[in-house]
Image: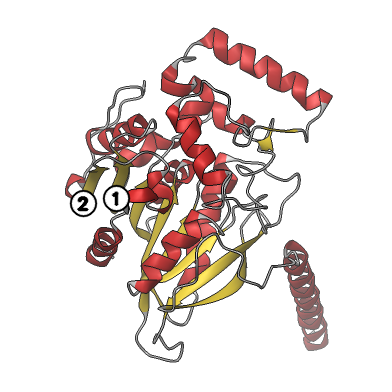
């Protein structure tokens, strides 16, 4: 009898060992070897107040994300003092070599460990077909960045915040609603990508007939050419275009912000790559965010209505342009709406000509709330 028990235990241990080996093998298979550019190829100069290195981390969807990690000069990885940290991404269709990297570097200058990452399917990160988006996957990108930062030796895992720029502002709010580990969130010059994808600009296509026509077109595109690219910032500019189109061109198509890996600077996004956004809504639960949020928008931004609606729904549980109504926020006092006088949408990408981004105000917000 004892011999049978011993044989049973040995068999169980063998199966467990094999299972662990298989699990390790599966985990290794999830990782993608990325060919990262090591030379400095950002659209902004490296500050002498920070250290910089390339890093990678995995998401729960099995994708490997590429990122730039910025730390303050003088911060020692072996020091017992742990620093607050911030993860940054955006704009939608941009890469970490553009304004998300700038935001991260400026925050590192002010004492934060800061991570600027390329989203899934974008830039140097993994994922095929390229330039594909998903409400779930992109929200996970932010949460995976929090996972990564939480495990760094020099980071306090109880003091982690995020910054989302443009289309990633809405994604940041969705992540903050989903993940209480995020202690403070800044949504800068935000787009609600689900609202604009489903309703059009200024809700001009907010009707069943327009959405049905768009869905039919997407269905045909999936059969005709599912990996076709379209969009990118228009170049050359026609004579008659809205001012915000000129602003996009001034950033993405000139030395100010052009980058060879940026979809906005080049051939755009996959035509059906944002199909899932049109049938989702990011902001449904943001009125339940208990942590601190700062929504920052330019006074003259064409996208200002996104930020103001998000703020009011987050605080009051209702806002113009949304047909869902929730309860008022249980923690309204740590929510802020900051309108930058004179600033356009793209002025909050890099400061524009007027140094419009209040870096010290952002640092103060994170320092107070994390």
State the SS at label 1.
strand
Distance in Å between CA atoms under marks 2 and 1: 7 Å
In screen coordinates, is 55 left or right of 292? Answer: right
Front residue of this view, candidates 342 and 10: 342
Residue bearing mark 1: 293
Query: In which quadrant of the rendered image does the N terminus lie?
Result: bottom right
Residue bearing mark 2: 334
Location of residue 274 by image quarter:
top right
| Residue 298 image position (x, y, % from top left) | 31, 40
Front residue of this view, candidates 169 and 369: 169
Q: Is residue 222 visible?
A: yes
Front residue of this view, candidates 338 and 182: 338
The answer to whether residue 201 is above or below residue 368 is above
Location of residue 155 by image quarter:
bottom left
Question: Which residue shows up at 60% across the image and 40% down it?
Answer: 134
Q: Is residue 112 visible?
A: no
In screen coordinates, is 309 left or right of 275? Answer: left
Please, which residue is most extreme toward the left here?
333
In screen coordinates, is 124 left or right of 204? Answer: right
| Residue 327 image position (x, y, % from top left) | 25, 33
Looking at the picture, the colour scheme in use is secondary structure
């Amino acid at each position: 009898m004892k011999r049978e028990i011993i044989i049973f235990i040995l068999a169980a241990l063998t199966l467990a060992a094999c299972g662990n080996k298989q699990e390790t093998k599966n985990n290794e298979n999830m990782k993608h070897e990325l060919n990262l550019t090591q030379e400095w190829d950002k659209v902004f100069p490296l500050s002498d107040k920070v250290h910089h290195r390339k890093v990678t981390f995995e998401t729960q969807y099995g994708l490997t994300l590429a990122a730039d990690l910025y730390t303050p000069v003088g911060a020692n990885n072996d020091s017992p003092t742990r620093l607050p940290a911030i993860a940054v991404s955006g704009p939608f269709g941009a890469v970490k070599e553009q304004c998300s990297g700038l935001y991260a570097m400026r925050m590192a200058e002010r004492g934060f460990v800061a991570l600027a990452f390329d989203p899934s399917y974008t830039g140097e990160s993994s994922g095929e077909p390229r330039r594909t988006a998903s409400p779930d996957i992109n929200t996970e990108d932010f949460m995976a960045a929090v996972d990564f930062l939480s495990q760094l030796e020099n980071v306090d895992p109880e003091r982690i915040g995020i910054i989302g720029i443009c289309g990633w502002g809405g994604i940041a709010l969705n992540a903050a609603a989903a993940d209480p580990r995020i202690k403070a969130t800044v949504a800068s010059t935000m787009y609600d990508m689900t609202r604009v994808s489903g309703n059009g600009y200024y809700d001009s296509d907010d009707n069943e007939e327009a959405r049905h026509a768009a869905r039919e077109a997407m269905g045909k595109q999936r059969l005709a050419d599912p990996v076709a690219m379209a969009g990118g910032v228009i170049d050359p500019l026609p004579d008659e275009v809205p001012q915000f189109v000129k602003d996009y061109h001034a950033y993405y198509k000139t030395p100010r912000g052009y980058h060879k890996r940026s979809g906005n600077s080049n051939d755009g996004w996959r035509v059906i790559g944002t199909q899932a956004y049109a049938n989702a809504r990011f902001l449904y639960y943001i009125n339940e965010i208990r942590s601190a949020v700062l929504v920052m928008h330019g006074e003259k931004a064409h996208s200002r209505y996104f930020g103001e609606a998000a703020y009011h729904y987050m605080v009051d549980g209702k806002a113009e342009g949304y047909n869902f109504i929730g309860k008022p926020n249980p923690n309204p006092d740590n929510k802020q709406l900051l309108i930058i006088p004179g600033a356009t949408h793209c002025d909050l990408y890099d400061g524009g000509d007027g140094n419009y981004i209040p870096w010290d105000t952002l640092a103060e917000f994170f320092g107070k709330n994390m």
